[in-house]
Image: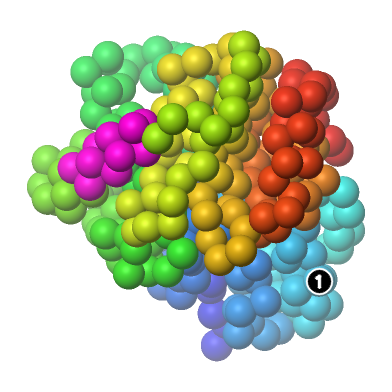
Amino acid sequence: MAQRFDICNGDADGLCAAVQWRLHEPAPAALLTGLKREIALVGRVPAKAGDELNVFDLSMRPNRGALQRLLDAGVRVRYFDHHVVEDMPAHPLLESHVDTATDVCTSLLVDRHLGGAFRAWALVGIYGDNLAAVADRLALDSNVDAGDCALLRRLGEAINYNAYGDEERDVHIAPRDLHAIMLRYRDPRDMLAYEPVVDEIDAQRHSDLQQALAVAPLWQDAGASVRVLPDAPWSRRVLGCIANELANAEPQRAHAVLKQQGKGYAVSVRAPLASPSGAHALCSRFGGGGRARAAGIDGLAQDELERFICAFANARWGEPPGP
């Protein structure tokens, strides 16, 4: 018997995209997800000929080889994503929905494909991916009032924050368990009303943010700033969240937040919201990747810190994204 698999990033964009699809198609499906930086997931899928695979918000670059093997084995794949990819497979079993524009995320791509059928969940994902202006416009077009927008944004930011950590014990709830809770509700506002886990995540998020904001920049000028956080459970959780907070607070400035790990650093980069591109180009020079407006480096060597800061200080923000 053919099986269905849903694979997604464990952040707000990935989870909300997967939830939209499964509400649209309420059939049994095995879920594979993980923490924010667990993106090479396609190779873990035990799919065989005739099976169906849905992929949401996972960069195709680290999954390219595994994807090709599954396609060649006869697995039908539907791929929604917004990360840069240079070499997309051409295969009759691949249905791709990839858009790397700076004002697009995976939840928005699924929303477009489904004709806005689960618009509130799409808004949660879009707000969680720090595309507030995009979400606000979409909400206005859908007659969602300001009060509900604030609720959906709070939920999106909480879900997104919960994806960051080096291992599952760092986060409040495993993303796969959070997905199961989300899937109970056709309307995310009901989840806010009935699930205490949202308040629990949000309280932890605000506590972690206070600690992160107390860390002074290691370097900054008028156009960019670099912060280095110590290695601790709170810093592992807050790495992406604090980068978004700083980007929103200072939209004319680029931000890099580093967290010490071993003899190096994990890095989260945000291009200035006023000219939101260039982050992927910068991070790819150091073995990282991501999107034009937001990218990261999983392992920056300690002796590369000075070179990274120099490259960051001289980055040309606002350059067109890659292919």
- Residue at x-position 16% and y-position 49%: 200
- Residue at x-position 86% and y-position 38%: 323
- Residue at x-position 46% and y-position 20%: 248
- Could you tell me if residue 262 is visible in this image? yes
- Could you tell me if residue 116 is visible in this image? no
**As rendered, which of 232 and 135 lies closer to the eye?**
232
Dividing the image into 4 quarters, which one contains the N terminus?
Answer: bottom right
Picture coordinates of residue 296, whole percent (x, y): 64, 46
Q: Is residue 238 left or right of residue 225?
A: left
The amino acid at mark 1 is Gly
Q: Is residue 210 found inside the magenta-colored segment of the image?
A: yes
Colour style of the rendered protein structure: rainbow
- Per the image, the residue denoted by label 1 is 65
**As rendered, which of 262 and 144 lies closer to the eye?**
262
| Residue segment shown in magenta | 202-214
Picture coordinates of residue 219, whole percent (x, y): 59, 28
As displayed, is residue 245 above or below residue 140? below
